[in-house]
Amino acid sequence: MFSHVVIFWTDPSNPAAADTLLEGMHKYLKPIPGALHFHAGKMATSHRPIVDQTYQVALNLIFPDKPTQDAYQLHPLHIEFVEKFFKPLCRRAIVYDFE
């Protein structure tokens, strides 16, 4: 299995950015074939100091293998999501990929 986790910090000047980003994920990323699991959501608050609470949205995808994830990255819907949603709505993102 191959996990692809993306953490997003949205533009603080746009209060609707997190919701709009999530809508874009569901419209453009969820239909891309290959993922065994798709989960996108807003940061969950926690009383535990070890839990990062600085971001707004996270995406967690599980693929059967790295080549399937590589194909996902090149899919036209992924590229369109990056241009239409990620670039205008986000200030920063970090990716955690692991096998």
Image (cartoon, rainbow, N blue to C red):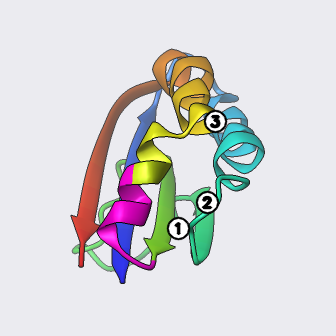
| Residue underneath mark 2 | 41
Please provide percent x and percent y for residue 18: 62, 39
Measure how far apart labels 3 and 1 are at the Cα level.
Answer: 27 Å
- Give, as a three-letter code, the residue at label 3: Leu
At x 26%, y 64%, the residue is 97
Please provide percent x and percent y for residue 58: 48, 56
Measure how far apart labels 1 and 2 are at the Cα level.
Answer: 9 Å
Please provide percent x and percent y for residue 21: 63, 37
Of residues 89 and 74, which is closer to you in this image? 74
Query: Looking at the picture, does residue 34 appear above or below residue 6?
Result: below
Secondary-structure class at tag 2: strand
Query: Looking at the picture, does residue 23 appear above or below residue 95?
Result: above
| Residue underneath mark 3 | 77
Which mark is drawn over residue 57?
A: none
Q: How crowded is mark 3: few (under 14 residues within 10 Å), some or many (20 or more)?
A: some
Of residues 59 and 81, which is closer to you in this image? 81
- From the image, which quarter does the N terminus lie in? bottom left
Of residues 95 and 35, which is closer to you in this image? 35
Q: Is residue 89 left or right of residue 4?
A: right
Q: In this view, does 34 lie to the left or right of 65?
A: right
- Give, as a three-letter code, the residue at label 1: Ala
Query: Looking at the picture, does residue 32 appear above or below residue 47?
Result: above
At x 43%, y 44%, the residue is 73
- Give, as a three-letter code, the residue at label 2: Gly
| Residue underneath mark 1 | 44
